Amino acid sequence: MFRALVVDIDGTLTDKKRAINCRAVEALRKLKIPVVLATGNISCFARAVAKMIGVSDIVIAENGGVVRFSYDGEDIVLGDRSKCLRALEILKKHFDVELLDNEYRKAEVCLRRNFPIEEARKILPKDVRIVDTGFAYHIIDANVSKGRALKFIADKLGLSVEDFVAIGDSENDVEMLEVVGFGVAVANAHEKLKEVADLVTSKPNGDGVVEALEFLGLI
């Protein structure tokens, strides 16, 4: 029924301590359909994890701001980081912000979770948004999301985005679950994601991924 899968990494294939679930990796390796890995993390992280998991080199990084189709390929940057940097200067006037991975980010700005995000949302311009992945805050070009990046990838693969199953855990996965044919939120997922999911698993993290793949008859 479904021709491809996109799965988040942090908090979905891994737990809060960033430990990857080996049962989930084994399950992904059994799939006979294309797999896309998605993350809010930087491209070099996504590239390395993809190689270790060993099912696909196609990745969405920086919450949809960067995509890559092959291990040795080039990063395709979909986001305008200049908008995010301007927004950062606004935040600096109100909060003591701490940048994360700044030298590696190509499409967004990543920050330590040490200030009230709802207050930040009130003062940021409309051309960006700020999301909480549970690991960090990300200032993102408003035109960027994992969902839009997946549409870009689907077009290149000759697929419809509705051919995909998506599995995630965080609010930065909402757009991704909204555009696919079937969306799954693992048990530890943010409530906003559970609201848009077609299935909420009974198990968290990687065990939830395995549960979803079994439910859909993909393994």
Image (cartoon, helix red, strand yellow):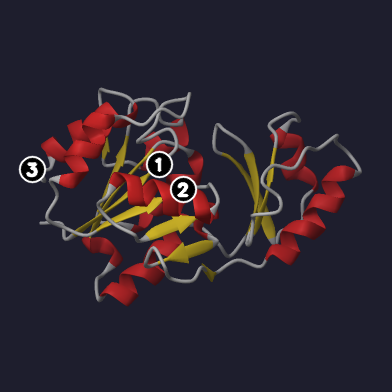
Spatial separation of the CA atoms under disc 2 and disc 1: 6 Å
> Between 17 and 149, which is closer to the camera in this rendering?
17
Mark 2 closeness class: few <14, some 14–19, many ≥20 residues within 10 Å: many
Q: Secondary structure at mark 3?
A: loop
Spatial separation of the CA atoms under disc 3 and disc 1: 21 Å
- The percent position of residue 169, horizontal first and vertical second, equals 41, 36
For marks 3 and 1, the one nearer the N-term is: 1
Residue at left offset 81%, top offset 38% = 97
User: Which residue is labeled 2 in the image?
Assistant: 39
Identify the disc placed on residue 38: none
Identify the disc placed on residue 217: 3
- Quadrant assignment for the N terminus: bottom left
For marks 3 and 2, the one nearer the N-term is: 2
Q: Are marks 3 and 1 in contact (CB under 8 Å)?
A: no
Q: Secondary structure at mark 1?
A: loop
Asked whether residue 46 is in view, the answer is yes
Residue type at tag 1 = Ile
Q: Are marks 3 and 2 in contact (CB under 8 Å)?
A: no
Q: Nearer the viewer, mark 3 or mark 2?
A: 2
Residue type at tag 2 = Thr
Residue type at tag 3 = Gly
User: Which residue is labeled 1 in the image?
Assistant: 9
For marks 2 and 1, the one nearer the N-term is: 1
Asked whether residue 177 is in view, the answer is no
Residue at left offset 34%, top offset 59% = 57
Residue at left offset 32%, top offset 25% = 204
Q: Are marks 2 and 1 in contact (CB under 8 Å)?
A: yes
